[in-house]
Image: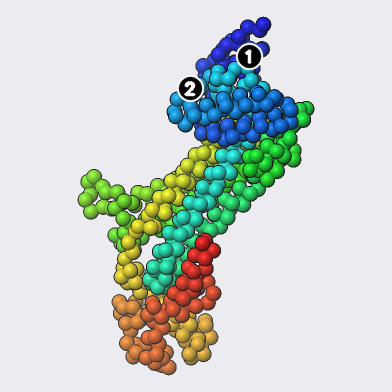
Amino acid sequence: MAKKPASGQEMWGGRFAAKPDEVMEAINASIDVDKRMAAEDIQGSRAHVRMLADSKIVSDTDRDAILEGLDQVEQEIAGGDFPFRKDLEDIHMNIEARLKEIIGEPAGRLHTARSRNDQVATDFRLWTRQALQTRADQTRGLMEALLEQADLHADTVMPGFTHLQTAQPVTFGHHLMAYVEMFSRDRSRFLDCQDRMNESPLGAAALAGTGFPIDRQKTAADLGFKAPMANSLDAVSARDFAVEAVSACSICAMHLSRLAEEIVIWASAQFHFVRLSDAWSTGSSIMPQKRNPDAAELVRAKTGRIYGALQALLTVLKGLPLAYSKDMQEDKELTFLAFDALDLCLASMTGMVSSWTVDKPAMRAAAAHGFSTATDLADYLVRELGLPFREAHHVTGATVKLAEDKGCDLAELSIDDLKSIEPRLTDAVYSVLTVEASVNSRQSYGGTSPVRVREQVSRWKELLS
Ligand code: ARG
């Protein structure tokens, strides 16, 4: 009988006599990261062994022993008393080694017609499929929180900006609905990615398929995959599903970061548009007046690590020949990191949005500043006096200049002031100079008027119900 291999070499012990170097073990081990896929690994092994028995590759007795052993492994992991071992490298070998301790010889039959290469690809796809679902659900939760606020603030007037310069009045509801649209696309990106990646690598074995009469359709169906992947080399080599998933996370994080930036601005004393609830603010140890929007700032900042994970993942993969290379082991840490960060960001954003207080008077006052209704005046001159738009723009420019010189808003100019620039103007012009008139007039499809905003809120509530 062959000599028992050194610890850590027991899975391929035949050829190896000496233990790996300590640093080799450190660089090689992924257990600290991939133990998060324990449930998926057990799920994959159950499907595999059931198929092996159905295909008469292992006996029903061995199958039952393996399934029972896996139940115990599952319980040990859930109960926190599973002995995770670094010398066993990863979750796949940890579980198999423990299974062997529990059930003995039949454990060795589980790995028939399977390799860690298709095993890890299967586990990782199962994990990512679920993570995409969770993020899609969280994104929907955030959309619902935004919809509630948009409904409440369908006619709350705020300044709309371009270049962060006051442009035209808009409604706060309209502004929030812009994010509902963005997050809805993020959500559909998660779901599209989930659908595209939902194919089973299991049974590709190491890279070339297997000579055993396995049934890949069966394991694919058992694991909820649409179909087995059609090419065994692709099955063990492809990580574009992870790249796509982390890209979808990155785009969502980018949207979250833009909203976070707005919250930071809105929560400042100078703007004072929103006040974050106590639960979502922090104080300063030295300046008692401070209410810091730390969560918003961290949402903005964590976007960096999510983009970083995407860049790192693309870089890890770019030079790899087919099929498996150990480089690919780095894929999981990066993907987990991106999904974890996005988890916190989505939850924080939903918390902030659902509990903030909106300072409507401050928003309205800001909306009226900066001659925000100048475009309305120009449009009025076109509509009522038949001026060409270019000339109306010129007349309006002169009116803004006059208001600026007098230190007042457009609506505060007297009719004589206005007539001094365009003699045909009458009192009727004041009806377009208020911010409320301005937003109410913008009823074109997709426009900011409260009627259009309410329509969009109802449309989205229906779509999400
Ligand atoms: N821990 C490995 C990974 O995450 C599992 C696959 C190892 N395969 C191999 N042929 N060494 O990629």
Residue named by callout 1: 13
Give above or below for 378 relative to 211.
Answer: below
Q: Is mark 1 on a helix, strand or loop?
A: helix
Residue 302 in the image, given as x and y percentages of width and height? 44, 45
Residue 234 visible in the picture: no
Give above or below for 154 relative to 297.
Answer: below
Please tell me which residue is depicted at 39% across the width and 68% down the height of the picture: 152
Amino acid carrying mark 1 in the image: Gly
Instruction: Bin the neighbour count of mark 1 within 10 Å (Cα to Cα): few under 14, some 14-19, many 20 and up.
Output: some
Residue 291 visible in the picture: yes
Amino acid carrying mark 2 in the image: Pro
Left or right? Give the position of 155 relative to 99: left
Q: What element carries label 2?
A: loop
Residue named by callout 2: 83
Please tell me which residue is depicted at 68% across the width and 35% down the height of the picture: 202
Please tell me which residue is depicted at 66% across the width and 32% down the height of the picture: 50
